[in-house]
Amino acid sequence: MTETIRFLMCSPDHYDVDYVINPWMEGNIHKSSQEKARQQWQQLYHILKDRALVDLVPPEKGWPDMVFTANAGLVLEKIVVLSRFLHKERQGEEPYFKQWFEDNGFTVHELPKDLPFEGAGDALLDREGRWLWAGYGFRTELDSHPLIAKWLDIEVLSLRLIDERFYHLDTCFCPLSGGYLLYYPDAFDAYSNRLIELKIPEEKRIIVEEADAVNFACNAVNIGEVIVMNKISDDLQYKLASKGFEVVQTPLTEFLKAGGAAKCLTLRTTEPLIPDHHANVTIESRILQLEGHLLDAGIMNKALDVVVGNGGSFKVLNFTLGIERQSTSSAEVRVSAPSHEVMEEIMVQLIDLGAAARPQEICDVNTAVVAQDGVAPDDFYVSTIYPTEVRVNCEWVRVENQRMDAAIVVTESPEGKTAKCTLLRDLKAGDRVMVGVEGIRTIRQAESREQRNSTQEFTFMGAGVSSERRVELTVEQIAWEMRQIRDQGGKVVVTAGPVVIHTGGAQHLSRLIRDGYVHALLGGNAIAVHDMEQAIMGTSLGVDMQKGIPVRGGHRHHLKIINLIRRHGSIAKAVSAGVLTKGVMYECVKNNVPFSLAGSIRDDGPLPDTEMDLIKAQEEYSRLIQGADMILMLSSMLHSIGVGNMTPAGVKMVCVDINPAVVTKLSDRGSVESVGIVTDVGLFLSLLTQQLDKLTRPLVETV
Ligand code: ARG
């Protein structure tokens, strides 16, 4: 018997499953046997009494979970951090536990209201006393960890729980003597697993399989070499024995019904303080500001979801609610994250939502110098489609050439300060590039409160008449905008794949070009080849476009066309020679609509006009989309994604594809301006030209 070790237990006189606050309790209300529970508890009590001292806190009627004394608080020496239960079903236990601690000479620390922490259920001391492992994610809030570190003067390592079956740290994690750790890795997020692996060498990690984990194998009481737990597999028993542990198994089925086992039923109240270990928390906090239609446009929800979803925690320091329908709100939020790495991940996403650190707090921009041409510093900030500003020498400077996936290069000279999106390959040694997340904000249009559903998706002939009608409505809207753009001298860019030709869309796209609705065409080798194949030979990839059936020997047609154009030297020359007399490419040449054909690995030929140097092709594309008001993306995932990557927010993108996955991928840029339409592209173009005809006919008549 080790006199120095003490446990606190609470007899199960009033124990029952009365409510559901964890997945184990579901379906088990009043299903546990009082008698059996008492026996199982007694057995555990005696096992412990043989090896340590056991104190008892009197059970209280109406608080059935009080048996789980692990949740009374967290003890170190004579200090206790009292639990603040998340669920009201258990909050009533707090005063009884507090009383017991006070009666037994402990200094009691209490967390602020609404900052839950569930004691030794969620905080486990390393058995060598080196640090405290603290769980969060379900019952305990991350923001409680710094307070615990301060009160107990100990290093706290935060671990995030992600499987609700393992809602308390002690259900899936058990530090053992000798520096061993018994745990179930899948209950933790990737960052936490990395932290565990960093702290505990591989030979000391004892991994529990799911089958044992769900039998609460990790919910064990460790006293020296002895481990007391519910029934476990022979495998695990053997594993533990091979590390020199003696496993004492005792059935605790009745308590499993409430989501607890051996460890939950006990609280070790003698945890000696190891000298020379001091408070240390890796938790980072930042104060951010948000402004806009925070409630109506759902920004506040999104922002807080980003924080929690990535393993952080928050405190809303103040919130000023816009009173009128059109007035904006503002908020100041303190965000905490378990590590710097997680904080940056959260910040990058919050910046996209328009959050920024208080400007007065950032003066010098956060930059690093490029050491090698074409290579950014590790921590470089990756740009997004949203208009962005960065702090250069205490001032916000608007970023030029906004696009996603670039680095931001800043300069400061007597002429002024600049910031510019620059592709990795264009970085030069000596450039100053924004790194980290400090001093960066995106300017989100205070989008009108009505427009909160950013992407609309329409399915043509997907489900009943209404969706068909919806495509028509969308096409009407697009036609209206295209007419406006044309009449105001704006710019519409089309990216198109060969499907446009295969589905009979060539005639309609040709019309659009001829009528001045298209101001640049982007595609690959194939659309041009099949368009000209159709114009010259009447087939598209060998299929007769009138009859819709393959033509004998038709598969060779496109090569004949490529060869023909190659003979003439370019598409334009074939047009002047009178060889090409209609179709999409013909109209481009005739109407001086610039086009760019970007090559790919699968191209036949290629056509002389196809740019096989992809860097040049990207530059061409990016030049042609400058100043675009609308981009019509017609059935080409490859070229459309390429274009999407270069396009800043604010440009209306219309994506048409028969495959919903493509439409979702392209229109899901989180910008209000994109519209996705799931339909046959030939049909879409036909509807569009019809609608444009309707819009222009009366005008034509009056001329
Ligand atoms: N029914 C209790 C709850 O959900 C079980 C607590 C188990 N305790 C523990 N330390 N894991 O709160």
Image (cartoon, grey):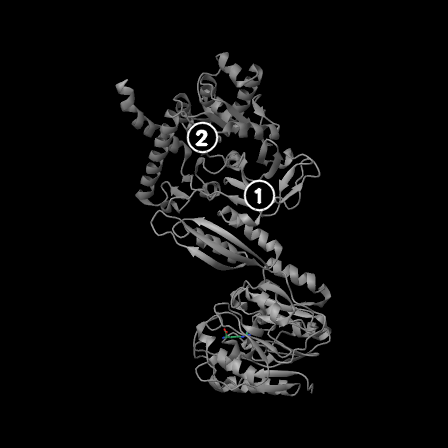
Q: Nearer the viewer, residue 541 or 517?
A: 517
* Residue under pointer 2: 500
Q: Do the residues labelled 1 and 2 touch (CB within 8 Å)?
A: no
Residue 20 shows in the view: no
What is the x, y in percent for residue 625? 50, 29
Residue positioned 49% across, 15% down in the render: 575
Q: Nearer the viewer, residue 360 or 552?
A: 360
- The answer to whether 416 is drawn above or below residue 337 in the figure is above
Which quarter of the image is occupied by the C terminus?
top left
- Tell me the crowding category of disc 2: few under 14, some 14 to 19, or many 20 or more residues within 10 angstroms, Cα based: many
Total tally of numbered discs in the picture = 2
Image quarter of residue 368: top right
Whole-number angstrom distance, CA of label 1 to CA of label 2: 51 Å
What is the x, y in percent for residue 309? 52, 57
Which callout, 1 or 2, points at the residue further toward the start of the chain? Answer: 1
Callout 2, which amino acid? Answer: Val
- Tell me the crowding category of disc 1: few under 14, some 14 to 19, or many 20 or more residues within 10 angstroms, Cα based: some
Which residue extends farthest top? 577
Label 2 sits on a secondary structure element that is helix
- Label drawn at residue 125: none
Residue positioned 51% across, 16% down in the render: 572
Which quarter of the image is occupied by the N terminus?
bottom right
- The answer to whether 18 is drawn above or below residue 314 in the figure is below
Label 1 sits on a secondary structure element that is loop
What is the x, y in percent for residue 551? 47, 25
Residue positioned 44% across, 75% down in the render: 89
Residue 612 shows in the view: yes
Callout 1, which amino acid? Answer: Cys
Q: Is mark 1 within 8 Å of ligand 1?
A: no
- Label drawn at residue 394: 1
What is the x, y in percent for residue 593? 47, 21
